[in-house]
Image (cartoon, rainbow, N blue to C red):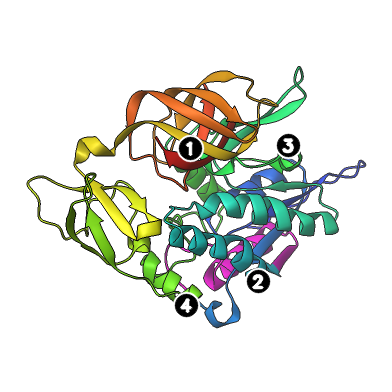
Amino acid sequence: MTFQKRSSRKKRERIAVAMSGGVDSSLAAALLLKKGYEVIGLTFRMWPKEECGASFGRACCNLEAVTRARAVASDLGIPYYVFDFSEEFKAKVIDYFCDEYLKGYTPNPCVICNEKIKFGLLHEKALALDAGLIATGHYADKGFNKRTGRFYLKRGLDLQKDQSYFLFSLSQEQLRYSVFPLSDYTKSKVRAAARRFKIKTHNTVSSQDICFIQDLDYAEYIKKKTGVAIKSGEIVNKDGKVLGTHKGIPYYTIGQRRGLGVAYSEPLYVTGIDRSRNRLIVGVKKDVLKSSLIAHRLNWMAIEDIGKELRVKAKIRYNHKPEPATVSRMGADMVRVDFDQPQEAPTPGQAVVFYNKDIVVGGGWIKEVV
């Protein structure tokens, strides 16, 4: 179906849509076009030349996805551009992912990709094409507080799909030019609307997990990309007693139960990673529950600064329910987060995001669990 552009004596505002080839960004483009914007479609290629033909179900921005996005843009009658960000993506996202795992942390590359690539480099390309705004298919909303003069994020209507967690690190300037057309949509409503618009991608499978890893074996991917030898080491309990041998730190994350290969009277979980001694620390279920953590590399969004102390609901991973907590300043760029109730497996390297009802107050990166 081809959408006719609206005519207007007043020059229409040009908006760039980051199109991944999926249903969400495709519908975002269609909705903005219907509202009267001058829409252009942008896609970035993140794959190096030797991998540009990669095709697997959950990947975004691969060759197959680019083909789908181009077809949707053609049906919509909008200009479409593809940019090669493979070198930048490797430097800013893949290298970060590998380095964090090698240090014993569990990274979140989706947050970095949004901040550095989608709302960073891609927006620079949009500006060069005279588009002052950039829209995505994220399930999130944006607001502006006239009293504080600050933009802020809100959770999307579909709380099962809400992606505000992945956007917590956006700056005020990035929020200023961001648009989220799906803020009031559920996933089922998106697919239904896409069918009405006769968009080709209405039934595409949603991308999941780490999009640039094809086989989901993180450790093997890291070895391939870095050439670093991954060494086995000891599995110990909290008292230092050796219980077994692990395959290498990048194979594990806090809270993991499977793949330990240690016989015990009850299930064991990874409770800590001692990078300096190449040790995996394990314990029983109750040992995974933690009440406090330290976060750094903070980004305050709805407020300019925390002050001394703040009551929030804190989310320690994407699929975690925000839980009541007190955030206390520890320094210029560090806070302590004390939960009202112990939480399962807060993980160094992951983001912790603070909410006031549906508004993202800010967030940071988990440095350690205390």
Q: Amino acid at mark 4?
A: Gly
Find out whether residue 81 is within the magenta segment: yes
Label annotation for residue 186: 1
Q: Which label lies toward us, 4 or 1?
A: 4
Find out whether residue 141 is within the magenta segment: no
Q: Please tell me which residue is depicted at 65% across the width and 64% down the height of the picture.
A: 44
Q: CA distance from mark 2 to mark 4?
A: 18 Å
Q: CA distance from mark 1 to mark 2?
A: 35 Å
Mark 2 = which residue?
A: 87
Dot 3 and dot 1 residues touching (CB under 8 Å) = no
Front residue (pair 352, 208): 352
Label annotation for residue 172: 3
Q: Please tell me which residue is depicted at 52% across the width and 39% down the height of the picture.
A: 165
Front residue (pair 226, 126): 226
Q: Reading the chain from its start, which is encountered first: label 3 or label 4?
A: 3
Instruction: Determine the secondary structure under disc 4.
Output: loop
Q: Quadrant of the N terminus?
A: bottom right
Q: CA distance from mark 3 to mark 4?
A: 38 Å
Q: Reading the chain from its start, which is encountered first: label 1 or label 2?
A: 2
Label annotation for residue 227: 4
- Which residue sits furthest left? 265
Picture coordinates of residue 109, whole percent (x, y): 52, 55
Q: Amino acid at mark 3?
A: Gln
Quarter residue 154 falls in: top right
